[in-house]
């Protein structure tokens, strides 16, 4: 770490029209993977890690790390877009679909809050994490997820700005009504669609 | 994979610029009382986790977010839930004023 501080990678609109078409408005491409953290990096031992689905959920669910890793997982190749304007194409993750985690759970809630080690939260509509649109990822680029990038596991919701892909995720709370999370309660957009450039509240 | 040092932890003085835009008095010597553990500390001694989305000033003792401040376009957003009070020194030089 450190040596890349001034290296912002390739910046600007790409010349390749196929790549340019994949870049939402106001974004630039980076080859790096910038790290944004709002607090100290937790170092969660997987021996004490668990993942919970709770709130307005019937039944509630809980997995230990070993149980979680025994769930069916898939490889996901997606473009990611940070509200601080970098985008990264073709990132490769491995994770468990949120559909799998919510399978068999009954709820009348339309919203969900992701809870993380360190107290970070983010809210997303339930419809945005179901139907093959979101995962709990435990590997990046074929390697276990670094703590700096959210390991042992992070939420991956690639069609929304990347702050929604909460690092160090430990649980999903089904809620009604919606409840703004860490950045959503500090001026950032409640939904955060990069293609509609929903960066800030009111955009 | 290379990483940038955006998560580098600095002390609260590093957030002085953004706080000076919001407050019209000296903030680095203003005292906070942690809502989590009761620790009394000047803003300048808090742990600042910052990046381009905003500045998070945390208690050095318990990591509670004492002050959260963000600038979104032409608005500032300020969350002070993490401090019981702010004790502001009257007569402390305002930003940009010469001391003494
Ligand atoms: Zn404290």
Image: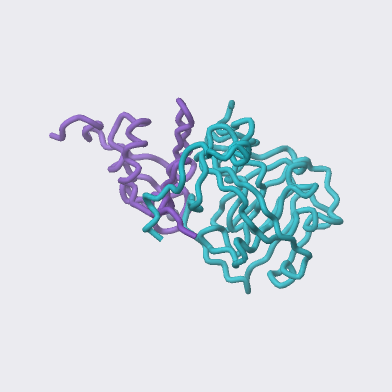
Chain colours: A cyan, B purple
Relative image position of residue A9 (x, y in whole percent): 45, 48
Q: Quadrant of ligand 1?
A: bottom left
| A62 displayed left or right of B5 | right
Answer above or below: position of B73 versus B13: above
> Residue at position x 31%, y 37% from top?
B88
- Which of the 4 image quarters holds residue A70? bottom right
- Location of the C terminus of chain A (image quadrant): top right
Q: Is residue B89 visible?
A: yes
**Image quadrant in which you'd find residue A97:** bottom right
Observer-nearest residue: A103 or A179?
A103
**Residue B82 % position (x, y):** 47, 45
Give the x, y percent position of residue A159. Answer: 67, 42
In the image shown, does A198 or B74 lie closer to the viewer? A198
Residue at the far front in the pictured view? A16
Please give the count of numbered marks on the rendered protein: 0
- Residue depicted at 68% across the width and 61% down the height: A94
The reply to whether residue B67 is visible in this rendering is no
Residue at 69% across, 42% down: A124
Establish if A170 lies above or below B32.
Answer: below
Which of the image's four quarters has the N terminus of chain A? Answer: bottom left
Q: Position of residue A126 (x, y in %)?
A: 76, 43
Task: Say if B89 sits above or below A166 in the image.
Answer: above
Q: Please give left or right for residue A139 compared with residue B10 in the image.
A: right
């Amino acid at each position: 770490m450190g040596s890349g501080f001034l290296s912002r990678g390739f910046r600007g609109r790409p010349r390749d029209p196929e790549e340019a078409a994949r870049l939402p408005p106001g974004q630039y491409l980076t080859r790096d993977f910038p790290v944004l953290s709002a607090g100290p990096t937790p170092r969660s031992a997987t021996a004490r890690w668990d993942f919970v689905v709770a709130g307005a959920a019937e039944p509630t669910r809980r997995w230990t790390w070993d149980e979680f890793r025994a769930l069916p997982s898939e490889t996901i190749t997606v473009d990611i877009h940070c509200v601080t304007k970098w985008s990264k194409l073709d990132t490769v993750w491995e994770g468990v679909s949120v559909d799998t985690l919510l399978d068999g759970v009954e709820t009348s809630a339309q919203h969900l809050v992701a809870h993380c080690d360190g107290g970070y939260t983010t809210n997303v509509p339930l419809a945005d994490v179901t139907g093959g649109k979101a995962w709990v990822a435990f590997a990046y680029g074929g390697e276990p997820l670094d703590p700096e990038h959210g390991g042992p596991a992070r939420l991956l919701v690639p069609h929304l700005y990347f702050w929604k892909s909460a690092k160090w995720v430990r649980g999903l709370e089904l809620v009604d009504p919606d409840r703004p999370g860490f950045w959503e309660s500090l001026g950032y957009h409640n939904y955060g669609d990069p293609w509609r450039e929903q960066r800030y509240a009111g955009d | 994979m290379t990483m940038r040092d955006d998560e580098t932890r600095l002390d609260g003085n590093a957030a002085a610029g953004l706080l000076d835009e919001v407050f019209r008095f000296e903030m680095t010597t203003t005292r906070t009382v942690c809502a989590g553990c009761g620790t009394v500390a000047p803003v300048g001694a808090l742990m600042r986790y910052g990046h381009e989305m905003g500045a998070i000033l945390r208690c050095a003792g318990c990591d509670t977010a004492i002050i959260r401040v963000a600038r979104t376009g032409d608005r500032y957003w300020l969350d002070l839930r993490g401090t019981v009070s702010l004790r502001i020194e009257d007569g402390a030089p305002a930003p940009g004023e010469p001391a003494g």
